[in-house]
Image (cartoon, rainbow, N blue to C red):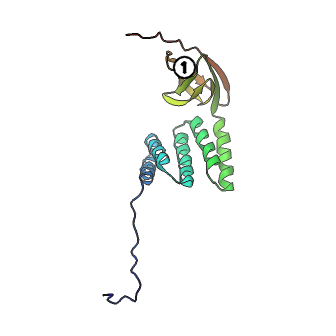
């Protein structure tokens, strides 16, 4: 029954289906290569959420940082490059190159200290970026900062940020009247 085989089992390469995280990362890479960084960012984020391996998750942080960088979201790029340095295992050469890149990007980022009468979530250009009171980073340029809090009216303000500067802004969120009915 072993026609011509000398007791060895024929070994066929085992092909396994890619995991959901791998599929999302492959989609992200294709979108990135096509220059669709916003869509790639969504797919890299999905891959990160699904990935169980810490080393692959760290590599995805780098990919997310590069997408933000290409989209001129230097504030987010800095944050994700810094997370990659903390959570990943880049070589000493890569670590030095990233430290230089982060330093250069920080020259294009403003810091804004936000004060508010209540704890609120901070949205910049319709992206959730943090909490107030607190400190946020903004890429240089024009932005819309909005603070949102439960039972309070949201407040939105236009801001012009210059790289390498620091601003302090205060927000007063009016309390909404109680609704009965």
Residue 99 position within the rendered picture, expressed as x and y whole percent measured from the top left:
68, 46
Q: Nearer the viewer, residue 39 or 104?
A: 39
Image quarter (top left, top right, bottom left or bottom right) of the N terminus: bottom left
Q: Residue at x 58, y 27 (%)?
A: 131
Where is residue 154 shown, x and y percent of the image? 50, 18
Q: Dot 1, crowdedness within 10 Å: few (<14), some or many (≥20)? A: few
Nearest the eye: 25 or 3:
3
Quarter location, residue 66: top right
Tell me the quarter of the picture where residue 147 sits.
top right
- In the rendered image of this protein, does residue 48 appear above or below residue 150? below
Image quadrant holding the C terminus, namely: top left
Q: Relative to 172, is 99 on the left or the right?
A: right
**Secondary structure category for the residue under label 1:** strand
Q: Which residue is mark 1?
A: 158
Q: Examine the rendered structure and indicate whether residue 170 appears above or below residue 8.
A: above
Q: Position of residue 180 (x, y in %)?
A: 40, 10
Looking at the image, which residue is at 50% across and 47% down?
48
Report the number of numbered marks.
1
């Amino acid at each position: 029954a072993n026609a011509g085989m000398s007791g060895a089992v024929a070994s066929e390469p085992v092909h396994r289906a890619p995991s959901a995280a791998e599929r999302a990362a492959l989609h992200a890479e294709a979108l990135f290569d096509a220059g669709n960084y916003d869509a790639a960012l969504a797919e890299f984020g999905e891959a990160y959420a699904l990935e169980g391996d810490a080393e692959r998750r760290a590599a995805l942080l780098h990919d997310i940082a590069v997408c933000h960088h290409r989209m001129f979201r230097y504030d987010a790029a800095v944050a994700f490059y810094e997370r990659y340095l903390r959570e990943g295992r880049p070589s000493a050469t890569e670590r030095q190159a990233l430290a230089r890149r982060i330093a250069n990007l920080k020259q294009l980022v403003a810091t804004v200290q936000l004060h508010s009468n209540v704890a609120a979530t901070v949205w910049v250009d319709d992206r959730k970026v943090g909490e107030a009171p607190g400190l946020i980073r903004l890429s240089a340029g024009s932005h819309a900062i909005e603070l949102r809090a439960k039972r309070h009216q949201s407040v939105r303000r236009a801001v012009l940020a210059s790289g390498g500067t620091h601003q302090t802004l205060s927000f007063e969120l009016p309390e909404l009247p109680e609704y009965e009915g």
